Image (spheres, helix red, strand yellow):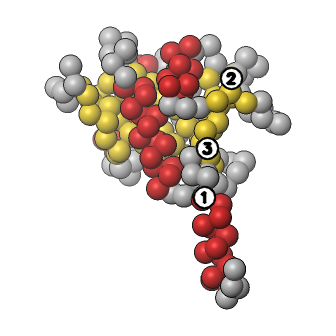
Amino acid sequence: MQFTVKKVDIRVPSIQTTLLFLQRKILPEDTPAETDRGHWWIAYAECGKPVGFAGLVRSTRWTDTGYLCRAGVMDGFTGHGIQLRLIKARLAQAKRLGWAWCITDTTDNPASSNSLINAGFKLYTPANPWGFPRALYWKKRIDPDAIQRRERKKSKACGVQP
């Protein structure tokens, strides 16, 4: 079976409906995340059925950091690398946005933790944890030169020569 991961336009009502449906189906005990900001992707089976989703927003703590806010794959479609493809799509978007880091958290979810490890994320302990008491926190350096490029751009805009 083949799958396609597509970045979706969250301004389209049917996309909002699909993202809400996927969240309720895949994560029935969770309150659905708001999907009216950031960047979102839907994974489709070859028949066109949506089988997974993922979101990326700017961190509320750091300006050069993206937060992998929510993701899931429907039962029956796990084990095909969809979660890893959704992570890689978000990392690529973060790099295009010039962010230096991506962060996320998991709680009681070995499958997602393993996908993050496979994508190069490392565990860390934030100074101010934001998740559940047993949450694991993950980070990955996306673009080590992002901060330097941003500083050079600011300097040029202000007429300062390096």
Q: Residue at x 26, y 33 (%)?
A: 4
* Mark 1 nearby-residue class (10 Å; few <14, some 14–19, many ≥20): few
Location of mark 1 (residue): 145
Q: Residue at x 34, y 45 (%)?
A: 8
Considering only vertical position in the picture, is 27 above or below 48? above
What quarter of the picture does the N terminus occupy?
top left
* Image quadrant assignment for residue 145: bottom right
Q: Is residue 11 visible?
A: yes
Q: Determine which of the numbered discs, if any, sits on residue 136 in the image.
A: 2
Q: Gap in Å between the C-alphas at discs 3 and 1?
A: 10 Å
Secondary element at image label 3: strand
Q: Nearer the viewer, mark 2 or mark 3?
A: 3
Going by the picture, which residue comes out furthest to the front? Answer: 162
Q: Gap in Å between the C-alphas at discs 2 and 3?
A: 17 Å
**Residue 91 image position (x, y, % from top left):** 49, 43
Q: Determine which of the numbered discs, if any, sits on residue 110 in the image.
A: none
Secondary element at image label 1: loop
Q: Determine which of the numbered discs, if any, sits on residue 141 in the image.
A: 3
**Residue 10 image position (x, y, % from top left):** 39, 47
Q: Gap in Å between the C-alphas at discs 1 and 2?
A: 27 Å
**Residue 28 image position (x, y, % from top left):** 49, 17
**Lower position in the chain sequence, tag 2 or tag 3:** 2
Considering only vertical position in the picture, is 47 above or below 58? above
Going by the picture, which residue comes out furthest to the bottom? Answer: 159
- 80 left or right of 90 in image: left
* Mark 2 nearby-residue class (10 Å; few <14, some 14–19, many ≥20): some
Secondary element at image label 2: strand
